[in-house]
């Protein structure tokens, strides 16, 4: 009855006006908090004879918490605090006839449950002082089967890391740096298969899925990476979920000022590959601040931060000398925490990263031999956006709380010529590699996402029920044009394209989950999630329904001892990812793309083209019956234990298999592309997409020590199949989702197409840590050693590629290692001010080995002269200087 009510309700909701839905969310006083930005504390209370005590009072105090929170133990002695802000807590425990106990330094992590285990209260025959103990220890989560990892600001501020949080996560196991241009790869997937969240708001670009709002680490309190095994209340992805929490205010003013600088004078000259434009001097610097504090003590807090980043480099334009490429990014964050009452709290957050670039050489795949005019190199580019969210929680009783959120993400990306001549067609003479004309096209794209979510958590004896609904809509207004002419001796190929697409998708969701403490040492979690997926035009007319399978998630945790120092855990889950809006041309009739063949230069006379081929039919494609969503199934099992008070070790096996994908293919008889599920429906003749990822993960972590902390991991994995993912490395590293070139033609998709996919790295070892000396000196370091990626040999046929030998069997890129270090010295002249001088050393003694190699052995059946040419090398050694002052 409950499920039936929610399913029927949400289906009707998807047909309503989005604004009305979100407005109704705001009117519900129970709304506005998402558990994606919190953690929990639990435990059991007994007397010194091991008997459970009910009615014991528990109070939480923390600089992260407005006021205090209280609860009481049940008849089994259990207690639990849910939806707690991330931070460090003191737990105050009192009961009549017992000594008061304070547990300090209790750490609450993002998305984790901190288990205090069995707490013993001593009976008080006479008046005794309060007893204080430390609760700092490695967290053995008795509930969650989510795997991945967390990094908090205490740790990552000591490490040599990129300013970009999206690259920081590569310190964690199963998260690998991609040298193909799609940033971090998680669990054998591509970078376009990740989802990014900031303060509970999904900030992933809904158009291509590769980009997301970028913030410097100085704004960030903690990062959580969910590689898999997560619960039904989390929107899923084919890769991983990256969740970031920014700082909040408190009852005391606190803040920081920071600045960083690097330039070519602090860097080695790296090797230039065929895809690199030649550059000379460069400088990168940014200066920013963050400030937080009270507006009204324990009632209203604020946090505000701003960080402009300036990047400048000299780029050599062939035959025309040096031009300046410069980028300005405005990163900012604003957060207000409002405690309306003891039971009702709100959080308003806005973040953003609008960026402007005077670009030189952007998008140049290979440097031309001769350039007649500089205009093809010169563009003006804008990107980035602004995000808004309102979150909150309403605690009805000790056992019932309601959470919700409403958010909006706006992004505007443009690219246009920076000169008048740049609007002309790009002309390339393929015989002598001479370029002239303009940049060959431009784009103007608005993207937005709106999400509303309501959920409730109910504590029922040994059960924790979580149920809710979510509604998301993505929208894109995309305008583009391109015009290129290629000359082959006396034959000219003219390519013309332009279009305007206005499209949305609407995604209602329902989820319900039960976490059952079967007995003291065994916890069982079972839940199910349903997502709808509807593609509509700008008028709200339904264009395509995508069938999303039910997504069951099951987890089990068994504690092996009474001290909660060991656990065995396992999970099964089904995870899907929404269909991106970049292939939206299939739902638009305002576009045209042509290829025209001439036997004379069409710039002089464009009449009488001998061949006209319609590359893409500019008509609305009919709805595809029973189009299935892209998803995978996953099994995992692991063992974890604490060693002493501050070391945690674990081993885990992960088995992940792709069940369905959506791809476009070329229909030669219709001279157009069509999309669907390969292996079924209109694409039933095509092979079924396959990607199997298996991994063994070993980790050891030391945390909470005064001097030395570290994280070490080793991952042994295999990534095998005929489908690499939503990002294509075989087609010049294109970030066009659902357009995998290996499926474009029926014949070639069956030839040698199954094997090791590009993200396969057999061995990856990582070690990161820091040592805090007593003299104010801190040294941090990170080391990564990893196998190369598999190489293939293929023939580019025009619409597709044909593997000459079995996929991934043509060797590998070299094994590489990377070493980075941070040296930081504290200059504490004043008691309340903390100053740090920072020296970062990146890619120490870099070998600059090839990491991306041209695998096109044949071009239209003829030997390709650039086969084996290096597209990218490892970065060269560089130095960054910085200073941070905090109070």
Image (cartoon, rainbow, N blue to C red):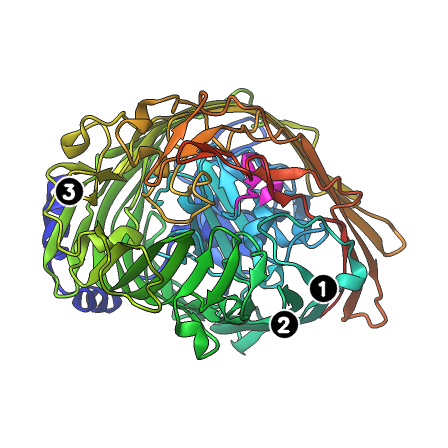
Judge whether 482 appears above or below 687 on screen.
Answer: below
Residue 182 painted magenta: no
Residue 177 painted magenta: yes
Name the image quarter holding the N terminus.
Answer: top left
Q: Which mark is residue 518?
A: none
Q: Which mark is residue 323?
A: 2
Residue contact between numbered discs 3 and 1, judged by CB atoms under 8 Å:
no
Disc 1 crowd rating (10 Å Cα; few below 14, some 14-19, many 20+) is: some
Q: In this orientation, which residue lies closer to the viewer: 28 or 803?
A: 803
Residue 76 in view here: no
Q: In this orientation, which residue lies closer to the viewer: 222 or 298?
A: 222
Q: Is residue 820 left or right of residue 237?
A: right
Q: In this orientation, which residue lies closer to the viewer: 394 or 20?
A: 20
Q: Is residue 439 left or right of residue 561?
A: left
Residue range of the region highlighted in magenta in the rendering:
170-180
N-terminal label among 1 and 2: 1
| Label 1 to label 2: alpha-carbon separation | 10 Å
Q: Which mark is residue 670?
A: 3
Classify residue 725 by image quadrant: top left
Classify residue 710 by image quadrant: top right
| Label 3 to label 2: alpha-carbon separation | 46 Å
Residue contact between numbered discs 1 and 2, judged by CB atoms under 8 Å:
no
Disc 3 crowd rating (10 Å Cα; few below 14, some 14-19, many 20+) is: few
Residue 201 place in picture, x, y as percent: 39, 58
Q: Which mark is residue 280?
A: 1
N-terminal label among 3 and 1: 1
Tell me the SS state at disc 3. Answer: loop
Tell me the SS state at disc 1. Answer: strand
Q: In this orientation, which residue lies closer to the viewer: 402 or 182?
A: 182
| Label 3 to label 1: alpha-carbon separation | 49 Å
């Amino acid at each position: 009855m409950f499920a039936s009510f929610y399913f029927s309700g949400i289906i009707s909701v998807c047909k309503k006006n989005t604004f009305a839905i979100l407005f109704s969310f705001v009117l519900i006083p129970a709304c506005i908090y998402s558990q994606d930005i919190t953690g929990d504390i639990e435990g059991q209370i007994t007397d010194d004879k091991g008997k459970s005590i009910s009615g014991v009072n528990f109070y939480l105090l923390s600089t992260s918490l407005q006021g205090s929170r209280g609860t009481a133990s049940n008849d089994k002695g259990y207690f639990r605090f849910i939806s707690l802000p991330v931070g460090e807590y003191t737990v105050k425990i009192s009961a009549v006839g017992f000594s008061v106990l304070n547990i300090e330094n209790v750490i609450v992590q993002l998305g984790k449950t901190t288990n205090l285990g069995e707490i013993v209260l001593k009976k008080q025959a006479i008046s005794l002082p309060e007893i204080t103990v430390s609760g700092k220890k490695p967290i053995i989560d008795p509930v969650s089967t989510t795997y991945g990892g967390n990094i908090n600001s205490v740790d990552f501020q000591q490490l040599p890391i990129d300013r970009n949080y999206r690259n920081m996560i590569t310190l964690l196991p199963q998260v690998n740096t991609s040298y193909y241009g799609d940033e971090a790869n998680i669990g054998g997937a591509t970078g376009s298969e990740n989802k990014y969240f900031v303060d509970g708001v999904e900030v992933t670009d809904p158009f291509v899925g590769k980009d997301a709002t970028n913030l410097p680490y100085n704004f960030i309190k903690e990062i959580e990476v969910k590689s898999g095994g997560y619960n039904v209340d989390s929107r899923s992805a084919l890769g991983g979920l990256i969740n970031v929490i920014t700082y909040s205010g408190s009852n005391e003013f606190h803040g920081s000022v920071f600045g960083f600088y690097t330039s070519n004078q602090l860097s080695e000259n790296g090797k230039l590959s065929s895809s690199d434009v030649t550059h000379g001097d460069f400088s990168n610097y940014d200066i920013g601040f963050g400030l937080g504090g009270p507006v009204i003590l324990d009632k209203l807090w604020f946090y505000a931060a701003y960080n402009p980043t300036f990047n400048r480099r000299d780029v050599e334009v062939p035959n025309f000398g040096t031009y300046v490429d410069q980028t300005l990014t405005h990163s900012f964050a604003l957060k207000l925490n409002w405690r309306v009452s003891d039971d009702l709290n709100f959080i308003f957050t806005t973040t953003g990263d609008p960026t402007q670039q005077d670009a030189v050489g952007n998008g140049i795949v290979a440097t031309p031999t001769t350039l007649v005019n500089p205009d093809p190199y010169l563009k003006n580019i804008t990107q980035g956006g602004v995000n808004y969210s309102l979150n909150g929680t309403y605690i009805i009783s000790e056992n019932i709380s309601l959470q919700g959120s409403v958010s909006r993400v706006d992004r505007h990306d443009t690219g246009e010529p920076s000169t008048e001549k740049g609007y002309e067609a790009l002309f390339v003479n393929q015989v002598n590699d001479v370029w002239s004309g303009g940049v060959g096209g431009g784009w103007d794209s608005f993207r937005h996402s709106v999400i509303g979510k309501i959920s409730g958590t109910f504590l029922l004896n040994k059960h924790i029920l979580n149920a809710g609904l979510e509604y998301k809509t993505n929208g894109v207004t995309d305008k583009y044009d391109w015009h290129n002419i290629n000359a082959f001796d006396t034959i000219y190929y003219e390519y013309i394209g332009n279009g305007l697409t206005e499209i949305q998708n609407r995604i209602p969701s329902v989820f319900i989950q039960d976490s059952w403490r079967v007995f003291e040492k065994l916890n069982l979690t079972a839940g199910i999630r349903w997502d709808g997926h509807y593609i509509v035009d700008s008028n709200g007319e339904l264009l395509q329904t995508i069938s999303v399978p039910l997504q069951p998630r099951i987890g089990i945790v068994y504690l092996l001892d009474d001290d909660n120092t060991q656990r065995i855990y396992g999970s099964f889950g089904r995870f899907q990812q929404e269909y991106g809006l970049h292939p939206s041309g299939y739902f638009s009739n305002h576009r045209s793309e042509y290829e025209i063949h001439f036997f004379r230069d069409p710039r002089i006379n464009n009449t009488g083209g001998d061949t006209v081929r319609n590359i893409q039919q500019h008509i609305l494609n009919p709805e595809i019956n029973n189009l299935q969503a892209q998803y995978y199934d996953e099994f995992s099992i692991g063992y974890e234990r604490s060693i002493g008070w501050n070391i945690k070790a674990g081993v885990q096996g992960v088995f992940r298999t792709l069940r369905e994908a959506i791809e476009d293919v070329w229909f030669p008889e219709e001279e157009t592309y069509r999309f669907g599920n390969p292996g079924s429906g209109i694409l039933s003749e095509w092979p079924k997409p396959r990607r199997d990822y298996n991994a063994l993960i070993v980790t050891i972590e030391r945390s909470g020590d005064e001097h030395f902390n570290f994280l070490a991991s080793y991952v042994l994995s295999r990534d095998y199949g005929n489908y690499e993912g939503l990002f294509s490395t075989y087609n010049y590293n294109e970030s066009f989702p659902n357009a995998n070139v290996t499926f474009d033609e029926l014949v070639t998709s069956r030839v040698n197409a199954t094997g090791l996919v590009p993200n396969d790295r057999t061995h990856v070892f990582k070690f990161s840590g820091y040592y805090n000396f007593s003299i104010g000196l801190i040294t941090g370091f990170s080391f990564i050693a990893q196998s190369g990626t598999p190489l293939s040999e293929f023939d580019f046929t025009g619409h597709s590629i044909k593997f000459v030998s079995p996929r991934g069997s043509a060797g590998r890129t070299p094994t590489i290692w990377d070493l980075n270090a941070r040296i930081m010295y504290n200059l504490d002249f004043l008691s309340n001010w903390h100053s740090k001088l920072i020296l970062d050393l990146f890619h120490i003694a870099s070998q600059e080995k090839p990491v991306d190699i041209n695998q096109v052995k044949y071009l239209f059946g003829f030997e390709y002269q650039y086969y084996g040419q290096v597209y990218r090398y490892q970065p060269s050694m560089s130095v960054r200087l910085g200073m941070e002052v905090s109070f």
